[in-house]
Image (cartoon, rainbow, N blue to C red):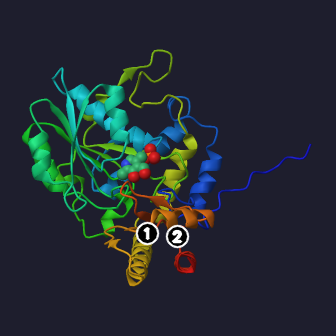
Amino acid sequence: MQRVEPAPQDFDRVLSSMCTEPHPMARQAAERFLATNPGDPATYQEVADLEREAVEMLGTVTGLPDPAGYVTSGGTEANIQAVRIARNRADTDDPNVVVPTHGHFSFWKAADVLGVELRTAPPSDYRADPDVMAELVDADTVLVAGVAGTTEYGYVDPIPELAEVAHSVDALFHVDAAWGGFYLPFSDHRWHFGHAAVDTMTIDPHKVGQAAVPAGGLLARSPELLDELAIDTPYLESTKQVTLTGTRSGAGVASAVAAMEALWPEGYREQYHRSMDNAEWLAAELRERGYDVVEPELPLVAADVSVALVEELRERGWRVAKTEAGELRVVCMPHVTRSMLRSFVADLDWY
Ligand code: PLP
């Protein structure tokens, strides 16, 4: 029987995804490490070494010397684990976590599985409002989270101010930079782990980092924080495990290292500028056509294109998403080129 090769994902019309085509070196590395399991580091030592390298490099990207952490299945796992670290570390029977309402839905999953109360603060002008967040914290707050590159608008919360809110009640401070993390070093947001007093951070190589899926990242300021997750593993050669899942993807780990080796820092810098230029170009084109556009802060454009028109564009093969408020949302990932955006705008004009 003839084997049918599945068609590879075609990114030609994908404007909705926060993942992208992996860098060629990342793709190759993923293939080479397909049959490895970093969840069993004593057996799969080579990929375990690569994971240490991945964490080291993520520390470099985020300005954290001697980082602790691991390569997660994605931003969801990293956010759940950050909440778990904070819950386990704290001395309260009634823990709560404070996040802005635009926090990724993984925080809702975290609250559900970990049995913590989630308190949500409405933003002002698309960013978390530290005063509103401050009203929600109390002695039982174990974690305050900010987002650096929100899922819907790509906006960056006031990170240093939110860190102060967290530490005023001795809570941990987590930054979800799952998507924005590889853009921030080249943007106007020059804060990093060090000066913003961040305790834990999510930064995903499989998004802007251009690694193959699955490769998320959880970083912690110290090994003691990561140890809050440790569970004994009696039948493995290693004695404890901090990860949420057991068997994990060596392909993701190896591809994360390969992508970062190939792209840090110049490749990512160029990508940031190319994507930002594209986002600004698209925003201007949409504005010229009379749409209300949310000024892009990172390479993500939201505009009040009607829901009916978004549906028409989807019919024409464009993979576009809407915000909760119903706006068209275009994520200018590395695979999104200017010519792709030109033909998107031409299709918009057609209707
Ligand atoms: N955090 C943010 C800010 C995100 O935008 C996303 C996904 O888009 C996540 C977390 C979840 O990441 P994943 O889908 O890799 O679990």
Place of residue 341 in the rendered image (x, y in percent of width and height, measured from the top left): 52, 76
As drawn, 107 above or below 300: above
Q: Report whether residue 237 is seen.
A: yes
Q: In this view, does 140 lie to the left or right of 44?
A: left
Res 191 → quadrant: bottom left
| Label 2 C-beta lies within 8 Å of the nearest ligand 1 atom | no
Residue under the point 53% across and 35% down: 248
Camera-near label (1 vs 2) is 1
Task: Report which residue position mark 1 lands on.
Answer: 305
Crowding near the residue tagged with mark 1, few <14, some 14–19, many ≥20 C-alpha atoms within 10 Å? some
As drawn, 253 above or below 95: below
Q: In what quadrant of the picture does the N terminus appear?
A: top right
Three-letter amino acid code of the residue under disc 1: Val
Place of residue 153 in the rendered image (x, y in percent of width and height, measured from the top left): 34, 61
Furthest-right residue in this view = 1
Q: Which is more toward the observer, 304 or 62?
A: 304
Q: Is residue 96 left or right of residue 280?
A: left
Give me the disc on residue 50: none
Helix, strand, or loop for circle 2? loop
Furthest-bottom residue in this view = 288
Furthest-top residue in this view = 234
Res 25 → quadrant: bottom right
Q: Is residue 330 left or right of residue 68?
A: right
Task: Report which residue position mark 2 lands on.
Answer: 336
Helix, strand, or loop for circle 1? loop
Q: Report whether residue 216 is seen.
A: no
Residue under the point 85% across and 46% down: 3
